[in-house]
């Protein structure tokens, strides 16, 4: 039984290894980029838009509204980063309905990479918004005694982000595998439908947590600094 | 009992205990969270979207505790480092 997509090896030569995570991630990137390119090729401002453009507008406006509601005043500045995170994780989890596909988010390498992106983005946006002094001062609030705890919280919540997404996706695949042994026919279908729901919720959670962390760092939400 | 048996027994038993205790706490926590959210929804149906969003985020955070336990128990069963170490030592002999 495979614990993660990393162990699915397609091709190997010396230490060069082409595993499932790499292949599926690049496939997803191709699908996302080509799809976006095809849809945005003919954008029209009038009322009668094409079906795909309408769908894309709903997605983008939805993400924008969620970012604004979660506490960031100018969602346009963060739309690129947060939207990419959400769309990547959501499509990665949604494509599990295709046979033979394994979600790259079910590998700790992918989720750790995504979490590190958030880890870097939080101080980046914080410094951009408040300057070095303002951002660094947020570590010694409310008192200087809290400094080690704030720094530790920064690392622990990155770890939590990575392990949460990995654990959820891995558990979905794992439970399916175990159920296929126990009750072969009907029940796994129900569980895989539940897995789709979990995947979407986790994509939402991941991006909303990134928004909350960024909002805390940029100071638009001075209270509740560290929900980990 | 030799080392291998000991490691296997300890890993399997502790994986079970990890899952059991690790599911208990988050289960209680999620129950309380949903109960609180439901009574809040009953009192203020207008704020449904905000309450639901906060509830989902909170549930995912509580659930991640159970997920950590699950990951640990999966590692203990399927990718146990101590077991691999013992296998490597036995192979070296």
Image (spheres, rainbow, N blue to C red):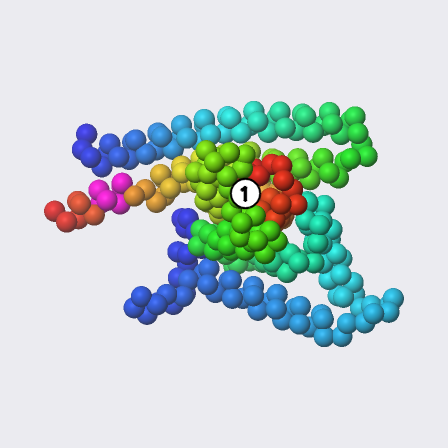
Seen at 48% across and 65% down, the residue is: A23
Quick check: B6 above or below A110?
above
Residue A139 appears at what percent x and percent y? 51, 42
Magenta stretch encompasses residue B89: no
> Which residue sits at x=68%, y=49%?
A72
Task: Give the quarter of the image for residue A51.
Answer: bottom right
The residue positioned farthest toward the right in the image shown: A47
Q: What residue range appears in magenta?
A: B82-87
Q: Which chain does tag 1 point to? A: A
Q: Residues within 10 Å of mark 1 (few under 14, many from 20)?
A: many
Residue B58 picture location, percent across and down? 61, 35
| Quadrant position of residue A39 | bottom right
Q: Residue at x 29, y 68 (%)?
A: A14
Q: Residue B33: x and y, percent?
A: 63, 28
* Residue A185 in view, yes or no: no
Relative side of A54 to A88, left or right: right
Position above or below: A137 against B45: below
The local secondary structure at tag 1 comes to helix
A208 horizontally vs B93: left or right? right
Tell which of A99 and A47 is nearer to you. A47
Residue under circle 1? A138
Report the side of A39 relative to A169 (left or right): right
Which residue is at the front of the view, B72 or A94?
Answer: B72
Direction front: furthest residue: A133
Can I make out residue B1 in this image?
yes
């Amino acid at each position: 039984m495979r614990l993660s997509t990393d162990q699915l090896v397609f091709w190997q030569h010396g230490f060069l290894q082409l595993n499932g995570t790499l292949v599926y991630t690049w496939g997803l990137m191709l699908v996302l980029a080509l799809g976006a390119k095809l849809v945005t090729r003919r954008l029209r401002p009038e009322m009668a838009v094409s079906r795909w453009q309408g769908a894309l507008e709903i997605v983008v406006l939805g993400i924008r509204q969620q970012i604004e509601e979660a506490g960031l005043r100018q969602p346009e500045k963060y739309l690129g980063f947060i939207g990419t995170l959400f769309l990547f994780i959501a499509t990665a989890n949604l494509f599990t309905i295709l046979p033979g596909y394994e979600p790259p988010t079910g590998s700790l390498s992918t989720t750790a990479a995504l979490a590190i992106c958030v880890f870097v983005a939080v101080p980046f946006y914080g410094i951009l918004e408040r300057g070095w002094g303002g951002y660094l001062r947020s570590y010694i609030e409310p008192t200087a005694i809290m400094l080690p705890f704030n720094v530790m919280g920064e690392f622990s919540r990155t770890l939590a982000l990575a392990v949460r997404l990995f654990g959820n996706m891995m558990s979905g695949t794992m439970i399916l595998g175990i159920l296929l042994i126990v009750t072969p026919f009907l029940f796994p279908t129900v569980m895989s439908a539940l897995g789709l729901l979990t995947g979407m919720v986790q994509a939402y959670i991941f991006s909303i947590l990134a928004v909350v962390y960024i909002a805390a760092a940029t100071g638009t939400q001075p209270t509740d600094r560290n929900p980990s | 009992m030799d080392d291998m048996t000991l490691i296997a027994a300890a890993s399997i038993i502790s994986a079970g205990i990890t899952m059991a205790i690790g599911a208990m706490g988050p289960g209680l926590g999620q129950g309380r969270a949903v109960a609180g959210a439901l009574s809040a929804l009953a009192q203020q149906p207008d704020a449904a979207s905000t309450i639901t969003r906060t509830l989902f985020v909170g549930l995912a955070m509580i659930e991640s505790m159970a997920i950590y336990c699950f990951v640990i128990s999966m590692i203990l069963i399927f990718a146990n480092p101590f077991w691999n170490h013992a296998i490597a030592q036995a192979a070296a002999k």
